[in-house]
Image (spheres, rainbow, N blue to C red):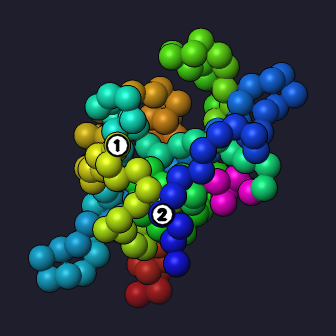
Amino acid sequence: MVCLVSRTGRHLQRYDDLGRRQVVGCIPYRYKRNSDGTLSTDLEVLVISSQKCQKMMFPKGGWELDESKEQAALRESIEEAGVIGKVECELGKWDFMSKRYGTFYEGYMFPLLVKEELALWPEQNVRQRTWMSVKEARDVCQHWWMKEALDILVERLTSLQQHKEQNISSCL
C-alpha cells in the first residue's frame, strides 16, 4: 500500500554540521522493451517537472530525521514521480547552491530501478513525468549535479553490462 499524501514542513528536516539542508534524490530508470516483449539494453530515465515551472529534473527532496537516505529516495520517487522500485547503491554526494534561495545544500543521489508506475501519486496535479533517453534527460535536466549523477549511473550500468557479456562469452 502506498501513502498518497506528500510530507510537508521542515520540522523533521536534516541539516549538516555547516547548517546546509540535506536532500536526497534518485534517478528512476528502466530498460526499454523490444517489440517481442524482451528487455533491450536501451536505458530510459524518468524526469519530472518542478512544481513552480516546467523545468525538468529528477525527484529529490529533504532527508528527514526518521528515515535513511535510501528510504528518503524511495519516498521522493513515490511523492514526486509516482514510481516504486529498488533503490540501488549511492551515486555520490554533491554540494550545491539553490538558485531560488541562494543557500547551500548537501545532496545525495541514488539509482532507482523502477518496478511499478503508479496511476495515482501525491504530486500528480503539480508535476509532469516523462520517460526519455539518457541524452534527452541530460539535455533537459536543470541541475549540473544531477547531470553528473546521471553520468555516473550510465557509466556504472555500462560497466555492469560489459562485465556480464564478458562472463557469458568466457562460458562459451
The vertical placement of 105 against 150, above or below, is: above
In this picture, residue 51 sits left or right of residue 77? left
Circle 1 SS class = loop
x and y percent of residue 170 in the render?
Answer: 47, 80
Q: Which mark is residue 4?
A: 2
Image quadrant where residue 168 sits: bottom left
- The 10 Å Cα crowd at callout 2, few under 14, some 14 to 19, many 20 or more, is few
Residue occupying the far bottom of the picture: 172
Task: State whether the magenta stretch is mostly helix, strand or loop.
Answer: helix
Q: Disc 2 residue type? A: Leu
Residue shown at 51% from the left, 16% from the top = 100
In this picture, residue 60 sits left or right of residue 30? right
Q: Which of 116 and 133 is in front in this view?
A: 116
- Would you say the residues marked 1 and 2 are in contact, meaning their CB atoms lie under 8 Å apart? no
- Answer with mark 1 or mark 2, whichever residue precedes in sequence: 2
Task: Identify the residue position indicated by label 1 in the image.
Answer: 126
